[in-house]
Image: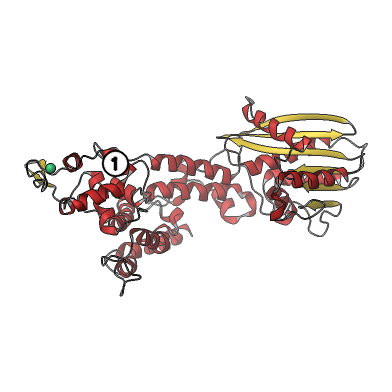
Amino acid sequence: MLEKVIENWTSRLDYIQASRGSPMPEIIFKIARKPHRPVKAGTPAGGAEAVTLRDTYLALIRPIIEYGFPVYYCASAASLEKLEKIQLGAARIITGLRRSFPKEIVLFEADLQPLHLRSKNILTNYFNKLSSYGHHNKTSLYFKNWHNNQRLKRNSPFSYAEHLQLPSSLIEPHSLKSCLSPSEGLPRVHFHFNMSAPVTKQDLIPAHLRQLALESINEIPCDAIKIYTDGSRLDERAGSVIYIENSGQNFYFCHRNPDFSSVFKSELTAIKLGLEAIINESDYGELWILSDSRSSLQHLHNWTQVGDKTSISILQNVKLISKHHDVHFQWIPSHVDIFGNEQAGRLAKEGCSLLTTSSPSITYSEHQSKISRQLSKEWKSPPSHHWYAARKPGSFLDLNCDRASKTAISRLASGHTKSLSFFEGRKTFKFCSKCKVQQASAEHILDCLGLSREDLYDSPLLVIDFLRVNNLMDLV
Ligand SMILES: [Zn+2]
């Protein structure tokens, strides 16, 4: 079965490789590059804007290159290199930079992440998600029971995942089945996404919000248990906090969550811990859970779709408690000085700084955001080059000027100007048309204009004006 899948994908890969010469991607690009008539007055005759070209590439070509990546990622390095070349070609068209440019700079200028970085991201996501599904998903089951017996001569996607140590052991299972029977439901559980009066945009005055929230809280019967919950995140650390009011007795506790937990999950963890704290209580009327996270409450409300471990635990406990008590989930606004909520919010920040965390497992989406952050950090550091000093990818793409000027400024920034040639292994440039004394290297051009390299990044439009006024555009 696996052989067939690979064969299928390899043929698609071949198609993409074959299409490099003429069909789809290049034709689309040619259309984008040379519109039949100018779109609007002022558009340069050279064709579409760099940003339009980039969008076209991202919308129409990159998805084809990345389609089915988890399966064909194990293709030979040479084949994958061909895919990178398609992207590099697109980056050259977008930026207008010549072939002699270092490819890292071209990709950085076009703000296109190398495919191997992106694919690592996609692949990790795919296998982590797959493994989290457990036995309900056939592919996941197959993957779990799979052993590399090397029957296949080529790398299979699974053996490649094993090589990359995927899936991560930190991923917590995600159920695909509802944990509650839909016929039984949750009859004594009520969700309130609004307060005593519906909140509209005009109610954004904190005092008014506070008033409404207090009205809602005052309507809660005296013999009810109130649990205020809050979750927060500081950099990569996350914490949850629970503040419980039970017939005049108040207590609270904080909890440090695994690093990279989302705020959303920290909110849910807080609700889960709150329920666990009162599950053995019996001497009360109703149970009210007050959270300032509407999205968590909405998530729990759609309990037929819920599959994450934390929410399942919440629902199971709610089901137990609701046999004897009515359970209410009430949304309250945050930061409007409601005592319990403010306490919970303040303590949640403390929760982040607690030293220990109970279980290190995180959901696949949290793990994904962790990987994406790491990769984007890796991507955002500019390629090392003695002259190039851009601070972020695609820094010249959004400039408010024509495409030729953007290309000129990119060239100047990378040092590979139009007049550059190599003579006996050394870089030589044409003579500067302004001073007519020295060679017009990027460094000299800026010197001659009385500008510095920082001006390229701080005020690129000014540099372009200087180049035009001094007739130096031909050299850049
Ligand atoms: Zn000069």
Q: Nearer the viewer, residue 440 or 211?
A: 211
Tell me: 387 left or right of 130. left
Residue at left offset 25%, top offset 50%: 464
Residue at left offset 23%, top offset 46%: 412
Vertically, is 333 above or below 39?
above
Q: Nearer the viewer, residue 225 or 204?
A: 204
Residue 222, by quadrant, is top right
Q: Secondary structure at mark 1?
A: helix
Q: In the rendering, at what x and y percent does residue 82 appear?
A: 30, 55
Q: In the rendering, at what x and y percent does residue 44 appear?
A: 28, 65
Extreme residue toward the bottom, this view:
36
Residue at left offset 83%, top offset 48%: 328
Q: How is the image coloured?
A: secondary structure
Extreme residue toward the front, this view:
469
Q: Quadrant of ligand 1?
A: top left
Q: Is residue 97 visible?
A: yes
Tell me: 119 left or right of 458. right
Extreme residue toward the top, this view:
355
> Which residue is the site of mark 1?
455
Q: In the rendering, at what x and y percent does residue 52 appear?
A: 37, 62
Residue at left offset 13%, top offset 44%: 440
Tell me: 196 left or right of 354. right
Q: Is residue 317 visible?
A: no
Give the amino acid at mark 1.
Answer: Asp
Vertically, is 106 above or below 246?
below
Q: In the rendering, at what x and y percent does residue 433 appear?
A: 10, 48
Mark 1 residue crowding within 10 angstroms, few (<14) / some (14–19) / many (20+): few
